Image: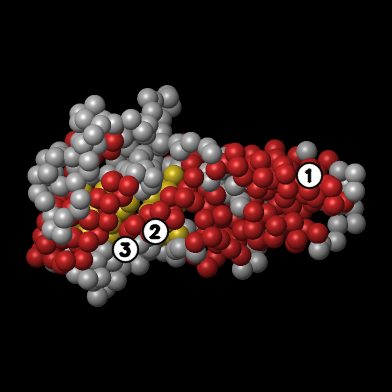
Amino acid sequence: MTAESKRASFFERLRRVTAADADEPEEEAGPTAPAPKKPHHKDEPSPKRPESTPPAPPPDAPEPNKKHERESDKQPEEEAGPMSPAPDKAKARRAGGWFAQLKSGLSRTSNALTENLAGVLTKRKLDAETLDELEEALIRADLGVAMAERIRGAIAGGRYETGLTEDDVRAVLAEEVARVLSPVAEPFALDENAKPHVILVVGVNGTGKTTTIGKLGHQFARDGKTVMLAAADTFRAAAIDQLKVWGARVGAAVVARNVGADPAGVAYEAFERAKAEGADVLLIDTAGRLQNKGDLMAELAKIVRVLKKLDANAPHSVMLVLDATTGQNAISQVQTFQEIAGVTNLVVTKLDGTARGGILVAIAERFGLPINAIGVGEGIEDFEPFDAHDFARAIAGTGRENDVAA
């Protein structure tokens, strides 16, 4: 087989890999979800309203007490409420700190990458075929085509007289991942000129938005900030109750209405109250919504529009919570939510439950949005500012002793 035909064969395999990822259904299980649940994102209409009922067009002002019975009624509940770190994770923190927990959490991603590379690295000769297979293995790890090509180029330009080893690949991988992620690794910072700083938290079903709000609220309160929460996920009573539990735990007031109230009305009322009471931060919880549901995305746009009636710069931050287990589907989520709500910040959850943590690298390279924090657990402290170098070491399966270049 000629070099040209080998290259063509590789790109045909690459096309099949990427096509399979693009067609993959979205995963919406809750963060612990040990047992399979009934699907909640089918495209059939809700039994509570006739199929022919059209979605109401977004008005210019909030409409309190408007009844919503849509697909979001059927979304899975997120975590039952605030939880403390499990004993084994608490022990891991004491023994090795955050990096030990991060490395443990990303072990599935690192192990999957190792398995993908194992068959490639049985050959000692670094020829074009080996590089093609290496590139395909990296793409299968959801690192993205651009990153895979860059790592291929770095390895092809290296000197491996005794053959290419797994450690060689890991070292290059850690260096290249850190290079891409370093510019977007930014701890979340409040705008001191915005009082309150309004943070609209968005995402698809079951990503952990409410728990993320609780963890953020805890950190702000710990830093001496006055925090207020708004329960704009009015489709589920459990979501409202969960936010109230978090509010009690972090010492934050919670603005909520009954199930079925207009989400934009709740956001508007909470913003008014937060301004009147001099709160430093207002965190607005929203219902999970699939990015391909036009009526629900229009509803999110309405929340943004209503907040701007009180402050043209609000919301000051739009935080998208991404579930790492969704793999390539996360890219379309970022794109759609950015178009509708103007996403400014990212938080990635469930990195400890997936073999597809490499998707974070592909997202960073494509969108360049600040990644503020990642979640590798369910406890209130399992939430840290995103560190590009620690993530790179963890995903490559190397230790801190093997420092990577900035």
Q: CA distance from mark 2 to mark 3?
A: 12 Å
Q: Which residue is mark 3?
A: 317
Identity of the amino acid at label 3?
Ser
Judged by depth in the image, the label closer to the viewer, 2 or 1, is: 1
For residue 278, say whether it is visible. yes
Other residues around mark 3 within 10 Å, as few (<14) / some (14–19) / many (≥20)? many
Residue drawn 35% across and 62% down?
Answer: 342
Q: Residue 355: x and y, percent?
A: 57, 40
Considering the image in quadrants, where does the C terminus appear?
A: bottom right
How far is the residue under mark 2 from the one under mark 1? 36 Å
Q: Is residue 168 left or right of residue 393?
A: right
Q: Nearer the viewer, residue 349 or 76?
A: 76
Residue ID at (44%, 54%): 334
Q: How many marks?
A: 3
**Closer to us: 267 or 53:** 53
Q: Earlier in the sequence, mark 2 or mark 3?
A: 3
- Residue at disc 1, secondary structure: helix
Q: Which mark is residue 9?
A: 1
Mark 3, secondary structure of its residue = strand
Query: Residue at the location (24% across, 66% down)?
Result: 314
Position of residue 65 relative to residue 363, above or below, is above
Q: Position of residue 352 (x, y in %)?
A: 50, 41
Q: As shown in the figure, which amino acid type bears the numbered disc 2?
A: Gln
Q: Which mark is residue 338?
A: 2
Relative image position of residue 181 (x, y in whole percent): 55, 62
Q: Nearer the viewer, mark 3 or mark 1?
A: 1
Report the mark closest to the observer, 2 or 3.
2
User: What residue is at 38 percent from the left and 50 percent from the top?
Assistant: 321
